[in-house]
Amino acid sequence: MKRRREMEKSSSEIRSAIEELSMFIKLKPKDNLDAPRIHIPTKPFLHLCNLVLQVLDKIGPTMLVLRQDIHQNIQRLEKFCESDPSKYANVVEILKKEASEGNARKKTSCSKAFLWLTRSLDFMVALLQRLAKDPGQKMEQAVEESYNIALKPWHGWISSAAFKVALKLLPDSVTFMNILIEKDETYDNLKEEMQTLTSLLVPFLEEIHSILRLQGLDMLKSK
């Protein structure tokens, strides 16, 4: 924990996320041909989601609804993990337990929390990809396109309407990039880091979506 706090103090959220994902890949258990192992480490995954929260904070209060949802879902998984940290160090074990008890599809389940956290990461990937490709793109357009891909298909009309209101209050893309950039960085450095992060996140999220499909959770919508 001490090392992580020091890392966060000296690194941007994007750099910290890159380090976290790189560690995932390095420490990921190797598959056994007879019994391939699906492993999503719970605490590192939640730390990654917390970094997304910090990026949303920099967008401003317009992302408050999404931010609150992410925070509540993180807390739900954290609380469950703390009930038996060794047993639930792998998110997949949490999903299996809830599935066996018939609780996976309940509104307050950890399975649904994991699903929506994954979709929030999908949104962040889509947004960073657009800003890295065209830093001059209007922030409203970049956020709306990312929302339409990652979240809108799963949201009800109330959530969609709230998001449309939030779009009108976004900072411009230059302001957002200036907030993200560190003192020792250039725009080219930031763009490169965005591309590195998304290149790591895309295969990681593909693996998570395959798990969600196996559990029959991938098509669930909000009420």
Image: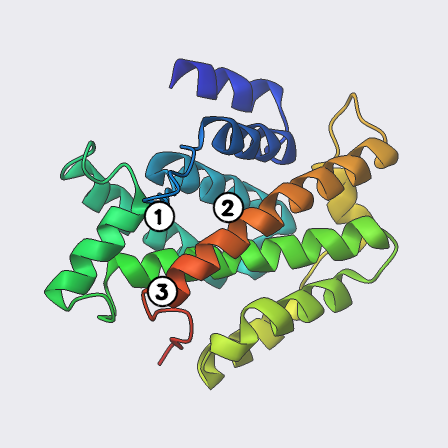
Point out residue 54 in the picture as x, y percentages from the top left corner. 54, 41
- Vertical arrangement, residue 161 with respect to residue 146, above or below: below
Q: Residues within 10 Å of mark 1 (few under 14, many from 20)?
A: many
Question: Which quadrant holds residue 166?
Answer: bottom right
- Vertical arrangement, residue 19 with respect to residue 223, above or below: above
**Mark nearer the viewer, 1 or 3:** 3
Q: Residues within 10 Å of mark 3 (few under 14, many from 20)?
A: few
Point out residue 97 in the picture as x, y percentages from the top left corner. 17, 55
Q: Nearer the viewer, residue 36 or 69?
A: 36
Q: Nearer the viewer, residue 83 or 178?
A: 83
The mark nearer the N terminus, 2 or 1, is 2
Q: Of the residues shown, which amino acid type is indicated by label 2?
A: Leu
The residue tagged with tag 3: helix, strand or loop?
Answer: helix
Distance of label 2 from label 1 (alpha carbons): 10 Å
Q: Is residue 126 visible?
A: yes
The residue tagged with tag 1: helix, strand or loop?
Answer: helix
Residue named by callout 3: 214
Q: Are marks 2 and 1 in contact (CB under 8 Å)?
A: yes
Question: Which quadrant holds residue 136?
Answer: bottom right
Point out residue 188 in the picture as x, y percentages from the top left corner. 87, 35
**Mark nearer the viewer, 2 or 1:** 1
Point out residue 31 in the picture as x, y percentages from the top left corner. 41, 39
Residue named by callout 2: 53
Q: Of the residues shown, which amino acid type is indicated by label 1?
A: Ile
Residue named by callout 1: 74
The mark nearer the N terminus, 1 or 3, is 1
Q: Of the residues shown, which amino acid type is indicated by label 3?
A: Leu
The residue tagged with tag 2: helix, strand or loop?
Answer: helix
- Vertical arrangement, residue 160 with respect to residue 146, above or below: below
- Say left or right for 194 vs 60: right
- Say left or right for 223 vs 53: left
